[in-house]
Image: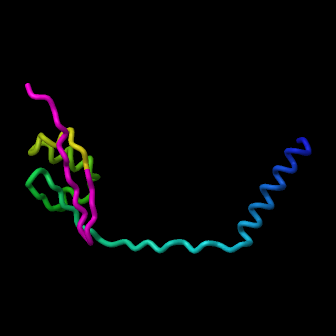
């Protein structure tokens, strides 16, 4: 190792020690709130039940596209309002014919 490399390593060590000496930043508190999920397909609202509770949004789309084929290639938009997570399936414009 050259003198230059040793100086770089020493500088990194000193910087780390200074950062730790300045004090640790308190970790943010994250609250876990039970939320219910609501799926919206066009004007239809579908409330989450036991069959969809463990599914991701993409997996729920795969289940729902049997009854609602327009969501097969849709964009998923998720919003949270209080304790309700709303998952909207936004259809993509396609070609006619």
Please report the residue visible at 90 percent of the width from the left and 41 percent of the height from the top: 2
Whole-percent x and y of residue 39?
Answer: 17, 56
Q: Is residue 91 magenta?
A: yes
Q: In terms of depth relative to the viewer, which is nearer, 92 or 64?
A: 92
Q: Farthest right residue?
A: 3
Q: Specify start and end residues of the magenta stretch as a single range.
A: 77-97
Q: In terms of depth relative to the viewer, which is nearer, 93 or 30?
A: 93
Whole-percent x and y of residue 80?
Answer: 28, 64
Please report the residue visible at 20 percent of the width from the left and 44 percent of the height from the top: 62
- The relative height of residue 30 versus residue 71 in the rendered view (above or below) is below
**Does residue 4 appear left or right of residue 82 in this picture?**
right
User: How many numbered marks, from 0 up?
Assistant: 0
Q: Is residue 1 magenta?
A: no
Quadrant including the C terminus? top left
Whole-percent x and y of residue 36?
Answer: 23, 66
Please report the residue visible at 87 percent of the width from the left and 50 percent of the height from the top: 7
Q: How is the image coloured?
A: rainbow
- The relative height of residue 81 versus residue 10 in the rendered view (above or below) is below
Q: In terms of depth relative to the viewer, which is nearer, 65 or 41?
A: 41
Whole-percent x and y of residue 17?
Answer: 77, 65
Quadrant including the N terminus? top right
Please report the residue visible at 47 percent of the width from the left and 74 percent of the height from the top: 29
């Amino acid at each position: 190792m050259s003198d230059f490399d040793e100086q770089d390593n020493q500088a990194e060590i000193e910087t780390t020690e200074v950062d730790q000496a300045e004090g640790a930043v308190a970790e943010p508190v994250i609250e876990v709130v039970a939320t219910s999920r609501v799926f919206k397909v066009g004007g239809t609202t579908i409330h989450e039940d036991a069959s969809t509770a463990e599914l991701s949004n993409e997996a729920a789309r795969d289940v729902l596209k049997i009854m609602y084929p327009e969501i097969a290639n849709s964009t998923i938009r998720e919003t949270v309002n209080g304790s309700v997570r709303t998952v909207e399936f936004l259809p993509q414009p396609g070609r006619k014919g």
